[in-house]
Amino acid sequence: MEYIYSDYFNGKPQITDKKQQIFGIVLHDDAENMAAKDYIAWLEEREQQGCLEKGWASIYVDKDTCYWFHPIEYVEWHCGNRFANEHYVGIERCQSKIDGVLSDAQFKENEEASFALAAQILKEQQLPVNRDTIRLHREFFDTACPARAWQMHVNDDEDTLVNRARLKDYFISRIQSYYEHV
Ligand SMILES: [Zn+2]
């Protein structure tokens, strides 16, 4: 795994204010074919065009690369929901487009990288791994996100609380397997 850090880790003024408190993590599926490294130029362009408010997360991950765009202690624009932006860390799982560049088996490798990262962050934040700390974008906003995971792990079933819990429990069990060894 290659870790790449943006200039925001090297003295560049932060985009946002600090989060008051971190409650947990939101795992996003980006619904794109872009690899984590592709987001470096993509975010730079958004920044130059002054349209970062369209959205960004702290971290972009695929199986090879972890791009840390912005420190997790700061508010992010990843959920379209103020409370979530101010209290949760966004992990953008790259190349998640359905019928895109990756097969399900290949996307699973990206997912595993996101789970390991989530475990590391929760451990550092001294937070447990449970349904309160692992959240879905669709819990905060009218979105299909995480659409690829929903298709793979809930068979694209109805968007009910039971099915949301099913997906979260899958995330939790995978994250737990890393958490124990961080
Ligand atoms: Zn999302």
Image (cartoon, helix red, strand yellow):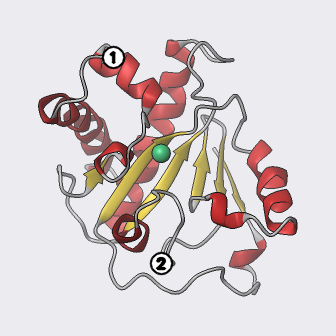
Ranked by sequence position, the earlier of labels 2 and 1 is 2
Considering depth in this image, is 64 or 141 the residue closer to the camera? 141
Residue 68 shows in the view: no
Residue displayed at 61% across by 50% down: 60
Q: What element carries label 1?
A: loop
Residue sitting at the far left: 162
Q: Quadrant of the N terminus?
A: top right
Placement of the C terminus among the 4 image quadrants? bottom left
Q: What residue type is labelled 2?
A: Glu
Q: Is residue 92 above or below residue 98?
A: below
Q: Read off the residue under disc 2.
A: 73
Left or right for 88, reference 180: right
Residue 30 picture location, percent across and down = 57, 38
To which residue does mark 1 refer? 156
- Residue 84: x, y in percent? 36, 64
Q: Which residue is drawn at 32% across and 80% down?
A: 21
Residue 131, above or below 47:
above
Which residue is pictured at 75% across the width and 87% down the height? Answer: 11
Q: Where is residue 171 in the image (x, y as percent from the top left)?
A: 29, 37
Determine the image quadrant of residue 165.
top left
Q: Residues within 10 Å of mark 1 (few under 14, many from 20)?
A: few
| Amino acid, disc 1 | Asp
Q: How far apart are the alpha carbons under marks 2 and 1?
A: 33 Å
> Residue, x 33% and y 53% (percent of image)?
140
Residues packed near mark 2 inside 10 Å, few (<14), some (14 to 19) or many (20 plus): some
Nearer the camera: disc 2 or disc 1:
1
